[in-house]
Image (cartoon, rainbow, N blue to C red):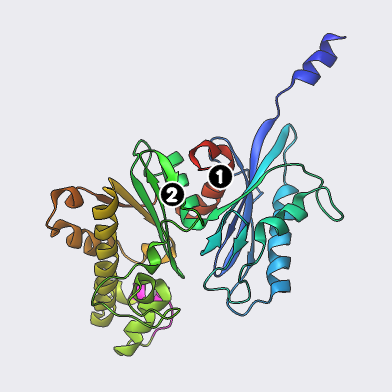
Amino acid sequence: MSIRLLVYRCRVLTPLALAVDFGGTKVEAALVDSDGRLVPDSRHRRPTGRTASVADLESSVGDVVRAAASALPEGAEIVGVGIGCAGPIDRRRGLVSPLNVPDWRDYPLRDFIASVVGAGEGGLGLDIPVTLEMDGVAITMAEHWVGAAQGVDNVMGMVISTGIGGGLIVDGRVITGPTGNAGHIGHVEVGDIVGEDTFGNASALEAMASGPHTVAWARTQGFAGTTGEELAAAYAAGDPIARDAIARTGQAVGRAIASATALLDLELVAIGGGFSHSTPDLFDRMREVIDHHYFPFVRKVRIVPSALSSEGPLIGAAALIHRATLLPA
């Protein structure tokens, strides 16, 4: 055998994960390397939303997966697909029921994406694993891997955006629960703060503290805007209603974090998502709740912004492949 042929046969291709992040307003896909870096020009996005049909959603998902895969660089290979999806999910059966996407209830998202990348008719011909977890689990793994929670082994990640999601790492291991929904902090109850009725529960954190629900409460108090961006701008300008809305949301999130910390003895909570960027004061309101807690072990928890900006969910989806050893079987 020639030396040239031997080198060719022994060449190690760069392993890439095909990362998919499915949420209430958009689905994204990208290729991510084993250091948590997105491959240039591989990131693609399509809309989802409350009014999208099953056919619309499948088209969006299929489009971004194929577009990301087509950006595969020379000398690299796709070794798996990681999917982070808004919950609730059924991780064992690969089913998803994202609350803000009504047409998907027990939808087989894992199987659908497997068919897009697989060897069947119309597929990409790849024989690779496809892993599905809740998006909160994915973002928590991203923060633990390359983000704000590096070196910390008792962590909750949170996303405050269209909805509120979360995930948990305890003693360095990802906690999913039997269905995959452990860490679904958006649907814990936070006492006497009450928001809009959200899927039958006006006391759930998401009902008062997600971006849309915070804006909705502000509008009941006379705020004229309709978006989180407008509320953030009004807050910066000193609008008293916007300031009350942010304070209320921060208090609600702080209570949820205090409860989770009391239950799990967390060291750090990393928070991302579009509405979490509305103002740094939102984090101050959360910390005020923690600072007044009775137990010192609760007061010790640190609350920090995500270190990964908008790439976090995709890096987290890739972590389902590159850091799969942290996941339960």
Disc 2 versus disc 1: distance between alpha carbons? 11 Å
Label located before the other in sequence (2 or 1): 2
What is the three-letter code of the residue carrying label 2?
A: Thr
Quadrant of the frame with the N terminus = top right
> Does the image show residue 86?
no
Q: Is residue 226 magenta?
A: yes
Percent x, y for residue 249? 29, 71
The quadrant where residue 103 appears: bottom right
Name which quarter of the figure residue 262 lies in.
bottom left
Indicate the secondary structure of the residue bearing disc 2.
helix
Dot 2 crowding, Cα within 10 Å, few <14, some 14–19, many 20+: many
Magenta region, mostly helix, strand or loop?
Answer: helix
Q: Is residue 261 above or below residue 53?
A: above
Q: Residue under circle 2?
A: 140
Image quadrant assignment for residue 84: bottom right
- Magenta range is 225-233
304 is higher (above) or lower (below) than 212: above
Asked if residue 217 lies left or right of residue 105, the reply is left
Residue at image location 23% in from the left, 80% down from the top: 240
- Residue to which mark 1 is pinned: 320
Where, quadrant-wise, is the C terminus in this rendering? top right
Q: Nearer the viewer, residue 291 or 218?
A: 291
- Where residue 284 appears, as percent x and y from the top left, is 23, 61
Nearer the observer, 119 or 287? 119
**Are discs 2 and 1 less than 8 Å apart at CB?**
no
Q: What residue sits 62% from the left and 71% below the top?
A: 104
Point 59% across, 41% down: residue: 321
Determine whether 76 is above or below 247 in the image: above
Q: Secondary structure at mark 1?
A: helix
**Residue type beneath disc 1:** Leu
Neighbours of disc 1 within 10 Å: few (<14), some (14-19), many (20+): many
